[in-house]
Amino acid sequence: MTTRKPYYPSKTFDEDLGAFVDMCTVNKWEFPGIPLKSLQDAIAAQRAERASHDALELQYRKQHESFGVAQAQRYALFACALHAARGLFRNNRAVLAQLARFTGNKGNRRKKAVVGGDAAAGSLPVPSRPPVTP
């Protein structure tokens, strides 16, 4: 048996639930098997859990942003050091062979279709961009 993804109501659910509970309270509506107290407890729990959820989500976004910035700086440092190593050892084939594993990921780039002209021209390597220093 497969587990289903939980249903997440719209963002206005908090407001809708609160307005409905207020309407039930003001009009003194009672429903069989659903005490008004359980609806009032549900809106209190919803608001408390929503506040906790939003705080955690904000914390995650801040951490994600700072991680991305720090990672970009580390990548720039790595790219500079790699570029320097390739320049320093440009005549040493053994070292260049070791450095060959540090190439960019080209797996998710799509090849452009060559319209007319020489088909081999489309297979020429594209020069890489120089590393950006912060």
Image (cartoon, grey):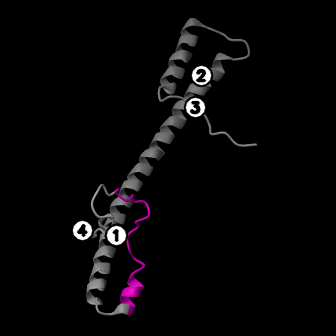
Distance CA(mark 4)–CA(mark 2): 57 Å
Provide the secondary structure element on which disc 4 rests. Answer: loop
Q: Which label's residue is closer to the chain start, 4 or 2?
A: 2
Give the labeled residue for mark 1. Answer: 75
Q: What amino acid is labelled 1 in the image?
A: Tyr
Say if 52 sits above or below 104 in the image: above
Q: Nearer the viewer, residue 105 or 1?
A: 105
Q: CA distance from mark 3 to mark 4?
A: 49 Å
Give the spatial CA distance, label 1 vs label 3.
44 Å
**What label sits on residue 132 in the rendered view?**
4
Q: Which residue is at a point 54% across and 22% down the rendered structure image? A: 17
Q: Nearer the viewer, mark 1 or mark 2?
A: 1
Q: Amino acid at mark 2?
A: Gln
Mark 2 lies on residue:
40
Residue 84: give x, y in percent of width and height. Answer: 27, 82
Residue 45: assigned label: 3
